[in-house]
Amino acid sequence: MNKSKIDNTAIFREIKSFIEQSKQQVAVTVNVSLSMLYWQIGKRINEEILKSKRAEYGKQIVATLWRQLTEEYGNSYSEKNLRRMMQFAKVFPKKEIVVSLIRQLSWTHILAVIPIDDPLKRKFYIEMCKLEKWSVRTFRERINSMLYERTAISKKPEETIKNDLRKLKNSQQITPDLVFRDPYFLDFLDLKDTYSEKDLESAIIAELQRFISELGNDFAFLARQKRIIIDNRDYRIDLLFYHRRLKSLIAIDLKIGEFDAAYKGEMELYLGYLEKHETVEGENPPLGLILCTGKNPEHIELLQLHKSNIKVADYFTILPSKKILLDRLHKAIDIAKNQIRNGEI
């Protein structure tokens, strides 16, 4: 008699799931233990150096310790790694903060964030990483792309930044200032020197996943060339998205060239239509994002676009050097903060 073949697919998948979950739990436990160990080592060395009050003694003790520890436990305790542990303990001196941090970020994540000097900037990256569950690679990319300087929150007063980050940490409550960026990096579209708005839109659709990655994880694509009819006239919204955490429709208008005052009226019309005909119960009013290649800041200031829920941002299809970009971003942050201080915003 032929025995029928036993189908064990279901039980195999279930057992495989148990094993994978267990491996993940073990990895998390090991990471927490190691990160805490590294913090304790760094803290103890820092205390010893502080006690002596001599810089030369600090160099000597690190040089002696790393040789002893490496001989006993391997290269994990090299001089470079010991100094990282010391930096970790210096940046995060309170144990209760460290306990919370290492439950959600790996040691490799921590290594990426501890060189950041600005405490608010550092906190921004930590909270956004926790919220969007960035891999180490994505975390480093976000830092290297100067995400903080490009996010609207960086141009706000210090108390506003602290308040928004506190809400994000305590209740995962996110504001538009934590979502929208300026400029956006669209170099991955690989556009030629001359292109039309249609070319730009087509390139974005072809690279939609990467475009959403640049926008932010909570954006969901809804439509391209969304048709709306007002007074028997046809209008088209270039791109329509939905943001899960903001609970808002996001209309994106793509422009070639500098911002023009007429763009405000167009976007207000789109947002008014979306709020009246497309918004469902429980959602917040829609938001507009106009992407162009030159912002004309005085136009934007005089038009008071923030009162209309409209954001304007530059985009780059070819990135300038990091130095030029950083200078530009810091200048934009300084101008915005001066305007706030002077009551202009």
Image: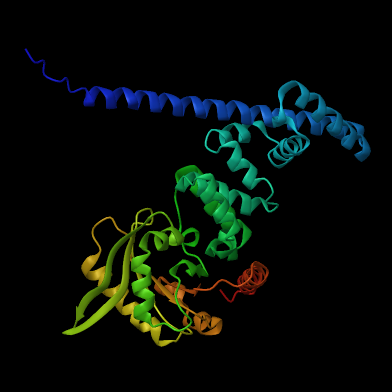
Examine the image and state in which quarter residue 322 appears. Answer: bottom right
Q: Is residue 166 visible?
A: no
Residue positioned most to the left: 1
Residue drawn at (47%, 85%), measured in percent from left and top?
Answer: 257
Work out which quarter of the rendered image holds the C terminus and state it.
Answer: bottom right
Measuring from the top left, give residue 23's x and y in whole percent. 45, 26
Residue positioned most to the top: 1
Q: Is residue 7 left or right of residue 107?
A: left
Q: Is residue 2 visible?
A: yes
Examine the image and state in which quarter residue 217 appears. Answer: bottom left
Measuring from the top left, give residue 271's x and y in whole percent. 31, 73
Residue drawn at (53%, 63%), measured in percent from left and top?
Answer: 151
Residue drawn at (68%, 34%), measured in percent from left and top?
Answer: 94
Residue drawn at (22%, 76%), measured in percent from left and top?
Answer: 228
Q: For this rendering, which residue is in front, 321 or 133?
A: 321
Above or below, 314 against 216 in this view is below
Work out which quarter of the rendered image holds the N terminus and state it.
Answer: top left
**Chosen colour scheme:** rainbow
Measuring from the top left, give residue 254's x and y in whole percent. 39, 77
Q: For this rendering, which residue is in front, 296 or 204?
A: 204
Q: Is residue 325 left or right of residue 224?
A: right
Above or below, 126 against 300 in this view is above
